Amino acid sequence: MAEEQEDKRKPLGLKTENGNPVPLKSIKVDVHIVGYIAEVSSRLTYFNEEEIPVEAVFTFPVDDGSAVFQFEADIDGRHIVAEIQEKEQAKLTYQDAVEHGKTAMLLKEDNSAGDIFSCLLGNLPPQSEASLVMKYVIELPQEADGRLRFTLPTVLNPRYSPDVGGLTAGEGATYIPPSKVRYEFSMAAVVEGYYKITSVTSDRTKLDVKYGENNKIAKVALKEEFKFDHDLGFLVQYETPYSPQVILETGNPETEGLMKEDMLMVSFHPDLKEVAMATNGEYIFVIDRSGSMEGNEIENAKEALLLFLKSLPPGCYFNIVSFGSTHSSLFSNGSEEYTEESLGKAIKLQKEMDADMGGTEILSPLDDIFKRELIKGHPRRVFVLTDGRVGNTHQVLGLVKTQSQKTSTRVFSLGIGHGVSTALVKGVANNGGGKAEFILDGDRVQSKVVSLLKCAMQPAITDVTINWDLPPDVTLVSIPTESPTIISAGERLTLFAILQGFYKEKDYPESLVTLKGQQDGKPVTYRLIFTMGKSSEVSGSTPVHRLATKVQIKLLQDEESAKLSKEMNHISPDLGKEIKTFRQRIVDLSRHGNVVSKYSAFVAIDTEGKKVEDKAVVRSCPVPTLSEEFMTGLQTVIHTLCARRKRKAVQCCSMNTVSYGGEQSNDFSAASKRFCSSKAAPVRLKGMARKLTYVGGLFSQKNKDTDYEDSDDKMMSVIVLQQLNGEWEVSGQLLTLLGVPKEEFDKQKFSEVPSVMCTVIVLSWLKKEFSHRHEEWQIIETKALTWLTSQNLPMSVEDIIQQTTQSLWSK
C-alpha cells in the first residue's frame, strides 16, 4: 500500500504554459448505442500534485441535443452524487461550501449556448485524487445514406460576441493547440440492440471494431492515440437503417414528475410517396465570411454554394447574402430570377469569396432577410452556411423562431468544420422548420448539399395531426402536447408520450399511430402498427425519460428566446412576469427529470471529507481549439495585420482578452482584431487551405504528384459544367473528363443536336461511374431529364441512355 501511495503522489508532468500543473490527468469515455439512442459516460480524473488545495475549472463542448442527467464523484473512497438546483442557487451552494473549506463540485451549462459546459472542482486537497463522472443521452442523427452518426465534440473554439466586438472565451475556458493536450484520453463504445450491424466506420479516426452475436453487437475502440485536432466520431450502418424503433420505459413510482410515469418513444420514417420537387421558390444563401472561416471552411462553403447554385430549378428566384462584421447582398434590391445572367453574377461572386469580412454578426443579415417582402408564388427558403462561432446564439434562435413562422420562411443550416456550434446550427434549423447538416474533414460536400436541397424543394407536411389507437384502458399524453407544426418529407420523426393505465406484466394487442397532414395541397396519411407488450428499457438510466425531458426544456427555452426577441430593447412588466414563469417551468422540469438546463446546474458537496485550511488556487484545465491563431502562430498574424493596417489606415478596435493555456494572452487580443474589423484585409496563411485548382467553376483538390483530379473531383467538375436549363454543351474539357474521345462522340447518331448527345452521355457516365452515390446527383439528373424530355427525341430518354451505355461503355 505504501508503494502504491508513493506512486500515486508522483507528479505526472502536465503543465500549463506558465508552468502550473494541470490537475486534469485523464478523460475516459464509454459509449453505449442501442438503435438510435446513445448513452455516454465521461470520467474526468483529477490529481492535485501541489502542496496547496486547488480549484480545477474545465470548460468543454457537448452536443446541443445532449440530455445531461447525472454527475457524481469518487473522492478518496467516498461516492458523492450531485443534485439539480436552480443555477444561481447551485452557484451559491458551491461557493459557500468552498469558502468553508469543503470539497465541492459544480456542473453548469454556459449562459451563451447549450453546447458548452463548465465543470468546477473546488478545494481538491494536496496530493489527492478525484474522479468525476458526467452522463448524458442523445438521439443520433441519420445521414442521407441511412448511417447513424455519433460525434463526441472535443474541439472548442472561441466565439464572436457582437457586444464585445471580438472573440470571447466560454465561461472559464482556456485554450491550447491540439498538439499541446497532455491529459490521457480513451474511448470505448458498444453498439447493440434491435438491428444487425453492417459496419462501424470513421473517415478520420482509426478504429478497432470487433463484431459478435451474429453482428448484433459491435465493440469499438481507438486504434491509435487521439490527436484532438478534430471532433471524434464514427458512423453506424444497420442492415435495416430505416426500421422504426419503439421503446417502452417504465417509471419509478418513488420519484416525482415525469420520472414516475411510464414513457413511450416511437421513432420512425414516415413512408410517404415522394412528391415532385418544386420548380418555384425563393432561395437565399447566407454565407459566413468572417475571419474564423479562413482555410478549409471557406473553401467548403464556396464548394457548397456552387453546388446549391447549379442545382436550383429554372424559374425560381435567388440571392446570396455575405456576412461578417457587416453584410451585403449580391442583388441589393432583393432576389432575382434564376437566369444565365444572374447565375453568372453569382458564380463570379462565388469565385472571389474569401474569409475577409471580420466578425460573425449573423443576427443583422437574418433580420434583414425576414423584413424583405415575399415573392408571390415562391415560398422562401433560407440556407445558412457557417462555422457557428457565434456568442449571441439565443438571440439568433429567438429571431428565427418568431420570424420564420410569421413570414412562412423555412431555414436550413450547414455547419462547416470541427468545433462548430451545434447549438446554433441545429437550433436555427429546428426553429426555422428546416434541416441541419454538418461538413467535417473527409465528408463529401455533395451529399450534404443535396440532402438539404431535396428537403427544401419537396413540399413539407403541414397541418399535422397525430392520433393514437391504443388498447382499452390505456391512455396517452403526448410530449409535447401539441403536434409538430411542420414535418420534412423523408426525415425521421420521434414521438414521446406518457402512458397511463399500462401494466408491464400484461400482454396487449397491437397499437396504431396515425400521422395525417397536407403536402402540396393534398392530404397524406401514414400509419405505424406497433406492439407495446412488455417494457423494453434500453438501460437502467431511463434514457427515454431524459430525452423527453430535454425536448420539453428545449421547447420552453426556444419559446422564451422568441418572446425576448420581440422586445429586445425593452422588456415590459408583463413580459418580465411571463419570462419568470417560463424559467420556473424550465427549472421544475430540470429537477424532476434530473436534466441540466440553461437555468439549472448540478452541485454536490463532500460533507465527510476533511476540510482544507488554505485558500484554493484556481487551476484551469485547457481545452483544444482549432482557432487559426493557435494553429498558425500568433506573431505571423499580428505582423501581417499591423503591416496591412499601416498601408490601409484601418482603425484598430478595442482589445479583447482570451485565456491561452492558463494565461491571459494579449497577443490573442491583438490577433483577434482581424475578426472584429469589417475592413480588415484577408490574411492568407500558409499551410491552412487545401491546394485547390479551379476546374470548370469548382475549386477541387489535386493530388500533388499528379495532374488529374480524383473521382470525386471529376464528378464535381462534370456536374458544374451543366447549364442552367439542365443541358451539357460539348467541350474538349468535358469530353476529357468523361474519357470519351471526340471520334467516339461523333459516332453517336441519336440526335442532330450536339448538346442532346452530350447530355445523354453525361447521364450515362454518371450512372456507370457513380450509381452508388445517386443521391448526390439526383437533382442534377432531374434537371437534365426534364430538358431532354422537351427535345422531341425519337424514343424514350431511358432507352437512349441505355443504348448509349452499351455503345460507349460495354467495350
Image (cartoon, rainbow, N blue to C red):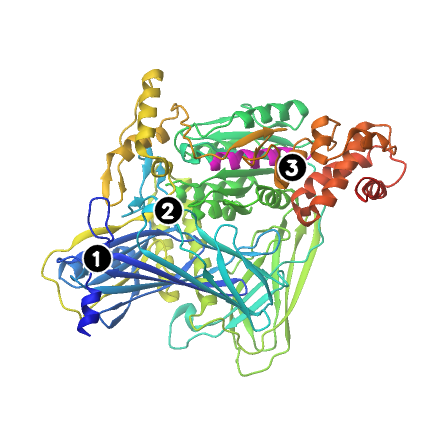
Location of residue 226 in the rendering, given as x and y in whole percent from the top left corner: 40, 53
Q: Say which quarter of the image contains residue 733.
A: top right
Q: Is residue 725 visible?
A: no
Q: CA distance from mark 3 to mark 2?
A: 35 Å
Location of residue 597 in the rendering, given as x and y in whole percent from the top left corner: 37, 56
Location of residue 58 in the rendering, given as x and y in whole percent from the top left corner: 29, 53
* Comes first in the chain, label 1 or label 3: 1
Residue 3 appears left or right of 132: left
Q: Residues within 10 Å of mark 3 (few under 14, many from 20)?
A: some
Location of residue 538 in the rendering, given as x and y in whole percent from the top left corner: 49, 71
Query: On the rendered image, what quadrant is the C terminus found in?
Result: top right
Could you tell me if the residues under marks 3 and 2 are in contact, i.e. CB atoms within 8 Å? no
Mark 2, residue position: 156
**Residue at coordinates 69% horizontally, 38% vertically from top-left?**
780
Could you tell me if the residues under marks 1 and 3 are in contact, i.e. CB atoms within 8 Å? no
Mark 3, residue position: 714
Q: CA distance from mark 1 to mark 3?
A: 60 Å
- Give the residue type that dot 3 points to: Lys
**Residue at coordinates 16% horizontally, 57% vertically from top-left?**
50
Q: Is residue 169 visible?
A: yes
Residue 478, relative to residue 205: is it above or below?
below
**Residue at coordinates 53% horizontally, 23% vertically from top-left?**
332
Instruction: Choose mark 3 or mark 2, whichever is in front.
Output: 3
Q: In this view of the protein, which residue sits in the foreground, 188 or 519?
A: 188
Let me know if residue 155 is in the magenta part: no
Residue 261, relative to residue 705: is it above or below?
below
- Give the residue type that dot 2 points to: Leu
Let me know if residue 310 is in the magenta part: yes
Instruction: Choose mark 1 or mark 2, whichever is in front.
Output: 2
Mark 1, residue position: 92
Q: In this view of the protein, which residue sits in the foreground, 380 or 125?
A: 125
Q: Which range of residues does the magenta coloring cover?
A: 296-313
